[in-house]
Amino acid sequence: MLRIFLAIVLMLCVVFAVYLAADRYMRFDQRRRLEQRHADGDGGGLNREDFVQKGMAEYERSTEKKLLIGVFAIPILVVAFLALLAK
């Protein structure tokens, strides 16, 4: 029983680490794209930092950000479903 518990904890740690890495990468990439858009003249009259902050706030509410939660939730749900089938 202890082995199963440790395996679940390890799986949760790995999935959480993958989620954090994907989240950081996506935030970095979004910020880079916003900075590039501002440099290309699509700033809308805002300075660079305000444009990037506004774009990042929109990103935080975006569907793309919400879909990233699937990286965390889907493996957990699949393992839980398989555990129920095996029982």
Image: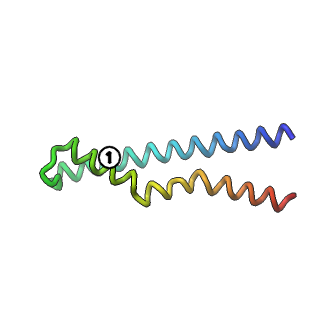
Residue 49 located left or right of residue 32: left
Q: Residues within 10 Å of mark 1 (few under 14, many from 20)?
A: some
Colouring? rainbow
Q: Which residue is mark 1?
A: 31
Image spot of residue 59 (x, y percent): 36, 53
Left or right: 68, with 55 as reference point: right
- The front one of 62 and 78 is 62
Task: Determine the residue located farthest toward the left in the rendered image.
Answer: 45
Decide: is 73 above or below 1: below
At x 48%, y 56%, the residue is 66
Q: How many marks?
A: 1
> Which quadrant, please, contains the N terminus?
top right
Badge 1 amino acid: Arg
In this view of the protein, which residue sits in the foreground, 87 or 22? 87
- The residue sitting at 44% across, 43% down in the picture is 24
Residue 81's quadrant in the figure?
bottom right
Picture coordinates of residue 27, whole percent (x, y) = 39, 46
Q: Looking at the picture, how far across and down is residue 75, in whole percent?
A: 65, 54
Determine which quarter of the picture holds residue 16. top right
Q: Position of residue 22 (x, y in %)?
A: 49, 47
- Residue lying at 42% horizontally and 49% vertically, measured from the top left: 26
Could you tell me which quadrant the C terminus lies in?
Answer: bottom right
Q: Is residue 44 above or below residue 11?
A: below
Label 1 sits on a secondary structure element that is helix
